[in-house]
Structures are given as structure tokens and as C-alpha cells.
């Protein structure tokens, strides 16, 4: 049952690929503004969810099986995803921002699905198999980016940073760590 809930949650997470794809196709100013509005809306929903018992009850009735225990009284992972995408859009060169966003959505999503379904070798409470899936997914995402703006050094460095920051048990939400670490790494290796 736990695996089914995680697959549901990560399927929703993988649906988030529309954010970097949408940002790719939108003019830069419009893409940033849309991300800002989406983030503000998500934060507004969070404020209502966290402070209004009726709204919280309705929210958990609809999404309860996808919410992790630590999110019950804190920000949801989806809000962190939007916040991170917004930060990437403002902090990095556009191709790096888009790929960093996709690393989060695809790499983190596949790490969880693979790790929970076939992972056997644990490190820091996660699995080597999940980490390998994250790394390979990130490499493929950057390699497939149209126009070939990335060197192999940037691709491998960014994918490795995303994978390490997905794996390590530091208290900052991994939805913030993955994209930002990959984006900064690729910027340094550019």
C-alpha cells in the first residue's frame, strides 16, 4: 500500500514536467510571471490549509493519501517545487533553469519510484538503485535538451549534484536542494 501511495504521489510529481516544458515555450518574462503567480497561489492555499480546520479537512479528504506525515503541518512538496522553479527561472541562464527544473521533476520522481519498487541497497535511508535512476534520468534530460547548449562536463556535473543532493539527509527539503544544486553546478561548469 505504501508503494502505491508513493507511485500516486510521484505520478503527480512527474506531471510537474509541464512546468519546465511550459517555461521552455513561454517568453522569458511571461514564464517568470506565470511561475510567480503559481507560487503565490500555492503559498496562499498553504496558508489557508494550515490555518483553517475546515479547509484542512477538505484538503485531506481530496489529497490525504498523497500527503506525507511531515507535510501535514508544513509546506507541501508541490509548493517547494514551484518555489524552486521560480528561483531557478530568476537565478540561472534559461537552458540551465529549464534543465534544473526537469532534474527535480524527473530525477526525483524516478528515484523514488525505482528506489521503493526495486531498491535493495540502502544509504542514508534511500537506495543506491533509486540514486542511479535519478542520475541516469538527469543525464538523459540534459542530453535531450534541444539545441545542444550543454557540455558533457555540465551534464554530468549537474546530474551528479542533483543525485547527491537528492540522497543526502540534510534538513532542507530535497525539492529545493535538487534543482538549485544542479543549477549552480552547471553554472560553475559552463
Image (cartoon, rainbow, N blue to C red):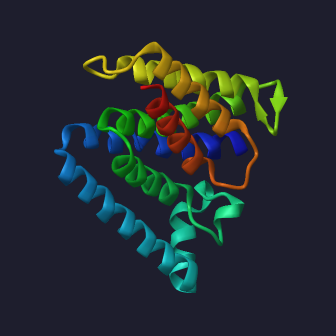
Residue nearest the viewer, comparing 123 with 181: 181
Q: Is residue 181 visible?
A: yes
The quadrant of the rendering that contains the N terminus is top right
Q: Residue at x 64, y 38 (%)?
A: 166
Relative to 120, residue 89 above or below: below
The image position of residue 30, as x and y in percent, is 18, 53
149 relative to 10 in the view: left or right: left
Q: Residue at x 71, y 22 (%)?
A: 129
143 relative to 47 in the view: left or right: left
The image position of residue 113, as x and y in percent, is 62, 33
Q: Is residue 1 visible?
A: no
Q: Residue at x 76, y 45 (%)?
A: 169
Residue sitting at the far top: 152
Q: Residue at x 52, y 28 (%)?
A: 158
The quadrant of the rendering that contains the C terminus is top left
173 relative to 37 in the view: left or right: right
Residue nearest the viewer, comparing 19 with 177: 177
The image position of residue 132, as x and y in percent, is 65, 21
Amino acid at each position: 500500500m505504501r508503494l502505491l501511495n508513493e507511485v500516486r504521489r510521484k505520478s503527480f510529481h512527474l506531471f510537474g514536467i509541464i512546468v519546465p516544458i511550459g517555461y521552455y515555450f513561454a517568453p522569458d518574462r511571461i514564464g517568470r510571471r506565470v511561475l510567480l503567480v503559481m507560487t503565490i497561489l500555492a503559498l496562499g492555499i498553504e496558508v489557508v490549509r494550515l490555518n483553517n480546520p475546515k479547509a484542512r479537512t477538505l484538503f485531506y479528504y481530496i489529497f490525504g493519501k498523497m500527503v506525507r506525515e511531515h507535510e501535514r503541518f508544513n509546506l507541501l512538496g508541490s509548493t517547494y517545487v514551484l518555489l524552486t522553479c521560480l528561483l531557478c527561472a530568476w537565478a540561472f541562464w534559461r537552458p540551465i533553469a529549464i534543465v534544473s527544473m526537469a532534474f527535480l521533476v524527473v530525477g526525483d520522481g524516478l528515484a523514488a519510484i525505482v528506489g521503493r519498487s526495486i531498491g535493495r541497497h540502502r544509504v542514508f535511508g534511500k537506495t543506491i538503485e533509486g540514486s542511479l535512476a535519478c542520475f541516469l534520468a538527469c543525464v538523459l534530460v540534459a542530453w535531450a535538451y534541444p539545441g545542444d547548449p550543454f557540455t558533457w562536463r555540465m551534464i554530468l556535473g549537474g546530474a551528479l549534484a542533483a543525485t547527491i543532493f537528492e540522497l543526502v539527509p540534510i534538513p532542507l527539503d530535497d525539492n529545493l536542494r535538487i534543482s538549485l544544486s544542479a543549477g549552480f553546478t552547471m553554472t560553475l561548469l559552463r
